[in-house]
Amino acid sequence: MSSHSSALGERHHQPILVCQQVAKVFHANQQSSFTALEEINLEVARGDFVTILGRSGGGKSTLLKLLGGFITPTSGQVLFHGVPLPGITPKIGMVFQENTLYPWLTVEQNIGFGFKVRGKQKCQYALRVQDVMEHVGLAPARHLYPHQLSGGMKQRVSIARSLAIQPDVLLLDEPFSALDIQLRRRLQKFLLNIWQDTEEATMVLVTHDVEEAILLGQKLIVVGGQPGQIIESADISAPVFSDRYDRNFLDLQQHLERVVGEEPDMMENPFSWATVSGPKITSHS
Amino acid sequence: MVKGNSGRLGSISRSLLPLFCGVISCVVFVGVWEVIGANPENPIAQVLPPPSKFLPVLFESDFKIGLGSQSASIYQSVTVTLIRVISGMTVAFVGSIVCGLLISLSKWSELFILPILGLIAPIAPIAWIPLALVVFGVSNLTAVFIVFMGVFFTLTIATVAEIKRIPENLLITAENLGGGNFVRWKFVIIPAVLPGVFTLLRLNFIAAWMAVLAAEMTGLRDGLGTVVMTGRNLFNSNLILLGICIIGITGFAVDRLLMMIQRKFFWWKV
């Protein structure tokens, strides 16, 4: 199953973000500590769309926070463009699961916020904001405030706000998991369109939804175990993995659901019994 | 669009309903008062003359209250009192936000300063009147100081609490978008705490209002409180009631004004 191929499609370029033997230990106090992640080796190249799959509390969000410089590794290092990541940087954008829009700003002001906080004059960024809003279909909502938007619109604005300042990498922490299934599908398509339209866009998305992980990713890793490690990784850049009714897609989905479902907390996926007792899986490689 | 229109009509009738009921209850209240006070032999009428008795005082005296050189027009009394309350509250509002931000800069300043504020906050603003009169004399500064003391400490404590309540991700996002420390204070923390602190300012307005009236009754020589005291000194219950009535109406108007400011400028929830 593990296929560490170097050829990840035509978009593969030099690595932007690299994890080398990264481990993260949280210390509750002097006596007790919790190892969230260990021996993480990961490479995110320019133009990649990496999805990180795992059950809740399995360390996948911790990995994303490490990649974004929000927390520092206990051992090992995270390299950004070849040098150790110093901390939070606008070069690595982050979209959270929950709403982080500023309620006192309109859609337009929220999207322009990244320029405003860096002391740019409005005339310098108004066009860019206008462009982004049109690109993501938010132009009609430009004067609305976050409380006037639906959950899906809010997430669109969050993504647009991060994209507006053109980060090298965009990290997304379960951005759609609070949305209903139809909306989630629409936004998945929306995100994929943005990734495809933008030549050098690099994205890392964390999810516990197997289908989402396959559908969006070009490269997929599964974080699991205790402490969390990368237990599977796969190149899923082939077109068959963007069709949710394709045989290969379904096989991989079943396989991954079993991998994630074998994790201790079975309540996480109430339908895991279906894949466990399902038809024989044809091996995917 | 049809739905939108009916919704708008609905909301107008909904917003008019409280006004309508409020007017009716006021009219009934005054009506009962007038009926009871119609008989001048009635002891209640002597202590609580109805509006038909005390309102004419205004016109007879050409809107002036007081004796000789000390008389001041009613507008002047209202304005003086309002300026005192509003300037005291403004200074307290700005000061408490600045102080709250400074205290929040360090865990230690919080630990050392907050207990002192917590100790001073419950002191009734009226209790500061004698001290203020000694320090500032009979002046506007005394009134402003008393209003300030009545509001500032509570608001500072509230500001610190509001800063703690800001979701961490709002701050992390600002940092992620490239905002430095100062910028995060300016563009995230201050706007995030404004609505909560302003709400508390509005709730504390009553305390400030009472404090300044008490100061005007005890020490200062002008303002609405003085109108009531003049009535007392002249044994003129019409004047007392007139003062009380104006105090009530002005206080109500200011409260509504603050509510409107809140809706217009500090409407968001974090």
Image (cartoon, rainbow, N blue to C red):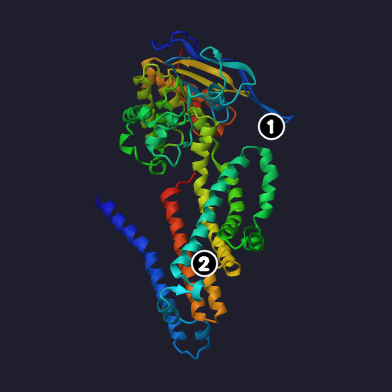
Q: Circle 1 sits on which residue?
A: A28
Counting labels gives 2
Q: Is residue B29 above or below residue B39?
A: above
Task: Give the alpha-carbon distance from disc 2 to disc 1, as whole Å.
Answer: 60 Å
Q: In which image quadrant can residue B235 be found?
A: bottom right
Say whether residue A141 is visible: yes
Q: Chain of mark 2?
A: B
Across and down, in percent, residue A130 comes to: 33, 30
* Left or right side of A136 for B198: right
Amino acid found under the numbered disc labelled 1:
Ala
Q: Residue furthest right?
A: A31
At mark 2, the secondary structure is loop
Q: Is residue A261 above or below residue B220?
A: above
Q: Is residue A54 above or below residue B249?
A: above
Across and down, in percent, residue A148 comes to: 38, 44
Q: Chain of mark 1?
A: A
Q: Is the residue at mark 2 from the same chain as the one at mark 1? A: no
Amino acid found under the numbered disc labelled 2:
Gly
Q: Residue furthest top?
A: A6
Q: Nearer the viewer, residue A46 or B173?
A: B173
Which mark, by number, is residue B223? 2
